[in-house]
Image (spheres, grey):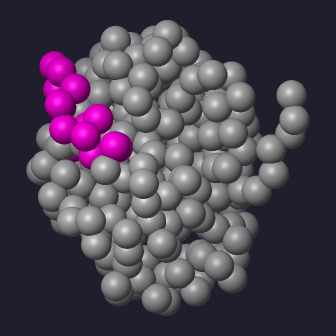
């Protein structure tokens, strides 16, 4: 197999494509159920087949997060999680062999210092960041910082995005495009939203970037369904729920690993 070049994200998607499957992207917030517990869970995800890890930066006003993620984030904040812990979790994901990103709202980045944040993320081995509430029109400083530190800025499109908005978004996105398949907040669902495929089809003429679909995927069957038309399958709330519902941290990590394994089988079953 030819070794892919480019960023760690580019390589992860290229490897998945060469294997005839979609890439599996998994999300967990740093600091839940504890900083070491989150790191253990991230490692379990990667060992089970997750290609790209999104490390959530806990934030006090998570506008897009569903109930599972909100509960985990609130617990992490109550436990005193710091941005340094986020970078440590990113480092653990990268060391485990995954392409690692931070998923963060914009306010914490701006408060920390845009260039300082990008430099620290790169130093931790991070490959990029997803900024769901930052639009391309206002992303100039972030684009400069990510370019300076070799990071991929990942932006989102949604079913409500106009053709002009899709075009402007893909113009500044690197690594992959995040297609939010449903309107509203995150959270597991019993079926894949029917607009997901339509959104991917709308995006394809605008870019050659991989398109990954997220929001609502909760099991291997749904992962297989999305993998049939998308380049990446993003799972967050379902993995977080494994930790929330576990009787103890060790059981939670084991549950994360089992679900990640099921999802990894799903993207290969497309």
Identify the residue at horizontal 17%, vertical 26% (top origin).
Answer: 189
Magenta region: 186-201
Who's the residue at 54% across and 53% down the image?
A: 209
Which quadrant would residue 108 be assigned to in this image?
A: bottom left
Above-or-below relation of 119 to 16: below
Looking at the picture, how far across and down is residue 21, in whole percent? 57, 23
Near-viewer residue (7 or 48):
7
**Quadrant, the N terminus:** top right
Count of numbered marks = 0
Who's the residue at 72% across and 44% down the image?
11
Q: Furthest-right residue in view?
A: 2
Q: Nearer the viewer, residue 161 or 48?
A: 161
Q: Indicate yes or no whether the magenta region holds residue 200.
A: yes
Position in image of residue 248 (x %, y %): 37, 20
Please state if 232 lies on the left or on the right of 10 as rendered. Answer: left
| Position in image of residue 243 (x %, y %) | 35, 27
Instruction: Judge by depth and name the residue closer to the eye, 200 or 113.
Output: 200
Q: Is residue 100 above or below residue 241?
A: below
Q: Position of residue 41 (x, y in %)?
A: 51, 30
Quadrant housing residue 43:
top right
Does residue 6 appear anywhere in the picture? yes
Please tell me whether residue 1 is drawn above or below residue 247 in the rendered image.
below
Q: Is residue 193 magenta?
A: yes
Residue 67 located left or right of residue 12: left
Q: Nearer the viewer, residue 268 or 48?
A: 268
What residue lies at 69% left-to-right and 61% top-to-bottom?
124
Residue 26 in sight here: no
Is 13 placed left or right of 226 in the picture?
A: right
């Amino acid at each position: 197999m030819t070794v892919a070049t480019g960023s760690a994200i580019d390589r992860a998607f290229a490897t998945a494509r060469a294997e005839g499957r979609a890439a599996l992207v998994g999300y967990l917030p740093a600091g839940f159920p504890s900083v070491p517990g989150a790191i253990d869970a991230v490692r379990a995800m990667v060992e089970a087949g997750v290609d790209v890890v999104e490390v959530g930066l806990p934030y006090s006003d998570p506008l897009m997060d569903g109930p599972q993620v909100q509960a985990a984030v609130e617990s992490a904040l109550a436990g005193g999680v710091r941005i340094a812990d986020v970078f440590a979790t990113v480092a653990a994901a990268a060391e485990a062999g995954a392409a690692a990103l931070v998923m963060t709202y914009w306010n914490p980045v701006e408060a920390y210092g845009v260039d300082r944040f990008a430099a620290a993320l790169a130093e931790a081995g991070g490959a990029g960041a997803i900024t769901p509430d930052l639009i391309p029109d206002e992303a100039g400083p972030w684009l400069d910082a990510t370019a300076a530190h070799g990071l991929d800025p990942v932006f989102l499109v949604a079913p409500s995005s106009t053709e002009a908005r899709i075009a402007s978004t893909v113009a500044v996105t690197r690594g992959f495009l995040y297609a939010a398949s449903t309107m509203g907040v995150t959270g597991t669902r019993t079926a894949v939203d029917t607009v997901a495929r339509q959104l991917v089809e709308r995006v394809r003429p605008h870019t050659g970037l991989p398109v990954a679909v997220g929001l609502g995927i909760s099991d291997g069957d749904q992962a297989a369904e999305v993998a049939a038309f998308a380049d990446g399958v993003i799972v967050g709330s379902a993995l977080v729920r494994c930790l929330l519902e576990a009787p103890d941290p060790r059981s939670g990590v084991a549950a994360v690993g089992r679900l990640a394994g099921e999802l990894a089988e799903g993207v290969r079953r497309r």
